[in-house]
Amino acid sequence: MKKISKWISCILCCVFLMPNAIIPNAYACTQACFGITWDNSVDLSDLSIQMCPSKYFTDSKINSAMFGWNDISSNIQVTQYTSSPNGLESDDADINFHEEELTGTLVGLTHLYRKNIFGKYIEIEDSELDSNYKVSQARIGLAPRLSSASDRNRYRFAAHELGHALMMRHPIVVGCKEPAVMQTTSSHCATGFITNHDKENLIAKWGE
């Protein structure tokens, strides 16, 4: 009787463990990044961020999000984080955050710019995100209503938009439904923190 019980227990264990053994690699969706890259003149291991208005600069969750992508790839590091008094005209850093009135449910929006032959900033359109253009600067708009959002959402939206400036895509675009801070809310996979899946995507783009 004891032997039969042992065999039944063993079989049950196998039944419960087998599904876990065939689950696909949770971090296999590493194509969720844009084809474009930053200009060679930008030191990606010494990126600068400028925050405006100052209410976001002193926000602990936003502050934490500004460095959330550090220590994943040795090639990507935010080392300078400052506040600007120059309002919407401020664009002195590699990545500049501004307060911006956004339509619909948008809380954050990332604009990527390249320089033309005359040195003038030209916004890179969505249709050009897999082109050979080089990004010279990123400008990120945060909606005024973000300031009244929860701790989780203030971190998530800031980290999400910064991820776009680091050339991260929405994973859902490439058919991936793994939880990630880079997922859209509509995907039902969006998290309030940077996951291992986000980290794998960053490494896929920039190396270890």
Image: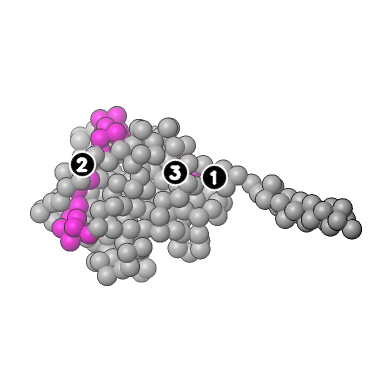
| 56 on left or right of 199 | left
Q: Position of residue 4 (x, y in %)?
A: 88, 56
Judge by depth and name the residue closer to the eye, 148 or 105. Answer: 148
Tell me which amino acid carries mark 3: Lys
> Residue at the spot x=44%, y=37% of the render?
203
Secondary structure at numbered mark 3: helix
Tell me which amino acid carries mark 2: Gln
Q: Is residue 120 above or below residue 172?
A: above
Q: CA distance from mark 2 to mark 3?
A: 21 Å
Tell me which amino acid carries mark 1: Tyr
Residue that carries the numbered disc 1 in the rendered image = 27
Q: Residue furthest left?
A: 85
> Residue at the spot x=19%, y=55% of the render?
57
Which stretch is magenta? Answer: 32-59
Judge by depth and name the residue closer to the eye, 109 or 130. Answer: 109
Q: Is residue 73 above or below residue 14?
A: above
Q: CA distance from mark 1 to mark 3?
A: 9 Å
Please identify the quarter of the rendering in which residue 79 is found: top left
Q: CA distance from mark 1 to mark 2?
A: 30 Å
Secondary structure at numbered mark 2: strand
Secondary structure at numbered mark 1: loop
In the rendering, which numbered label is found on residue 80? 2
Residue that carries the numbered disc 3 in the rendered image = 199
> Residue at the spot x=57%, y=47% of the render?
26
| 35 on left or right of 124 | right
Q: Is residue 172 magenta?
A: no
